[in-house]
Image (spheres, helix red, strand yellow):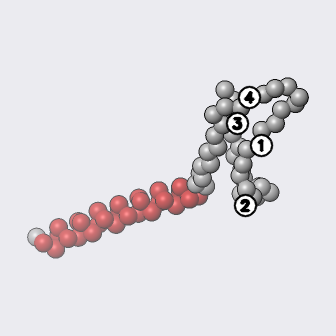
Amino acid sequence: MVNVHYNSSNNDRLIGQSLGIRLSSFGIQTNFDNVTLEATAVPEPLTILGAVTALVLGQCLNEKLLKTNIKNNL
């Protein structure tokens, strides 16, 4: 079994082109079986950082709002 991985960068010259598999043989009989292609989009680090920051700020604001509501109800 052979696994091949390819990770592209933001400025990769292949971005936007068709994704596919090419199989070839060098004069010897070759059998290909169970060939699959999987493509996964991985978020950039800044996207992950932004999401984490938004979650933390949201949690802090939620706690502050909760404390304010508790004080106003007393």
Please state if 33 lies on the left or on the right of 64 as rendered: right
Q: Residue placed at 23% from the left, 70% from the top?
A: 68
- Mark 4 burial class by Cα count in 10 Å: few <14, some 14-19, many 20+: few
Between residue 41 and residue 39, name the one nearer to us: 39
Q: CA gap, disc 2 to disc 3?
A: 20 Å
Residue type for callout 3? Val
Please state if 46 lies on the left or on the right of 2 as rendered: left
**Rendering coords of residue 24 (x, y %):** 81, 36
Residue lying at the far left in this picture: please name it.
74
State the mark number for residue 31: 4
Depth check, mark 4 against mark 1: the one in front is 4
- Mark 1 burial class by Cα count in 10 Å: few <14, some 14-19, many 20+: few
Is 46 above or below relative to 71?
A: above
Depth check, mark 4 against mark 3: the one in front is 4
**Rendering coords of residue 7 (x, y %):** 69, 46
Between residue 46 and residue 39, name the one nearer to us: 39
Total numbered circles: 4
Q: CA gap, disc 4 to disc 1?
A: 14 Å
Q: Residue placed at 60% from the left, 53% from the top?
A: 41
Depth check, mark 3 against mark 1: the one in front is 1
State the residue position of label 3.
4
State the residue position of label 2.
16
Q: Residue placed at 78% from the left, 28% from the top?
A: 30
Q: Secondary structure at mark 4?
A: loop
* Marks 4 and 1 in Cβ contact (< 8 Å): no
User: Which callout, 2 or 3, points at the residue further toward the start of the chain?
Assistant: 3
Residue type for callout 1? Arg
**Residue 62 visible here:** yes
Q: CA gap, disc 4 to disc 3?
A: 18 Å
Q: Secondary structure at mark 1?
A: loop
Q: Secondary structure at mark 2?
A: loop
State the residue position of label 1.
22
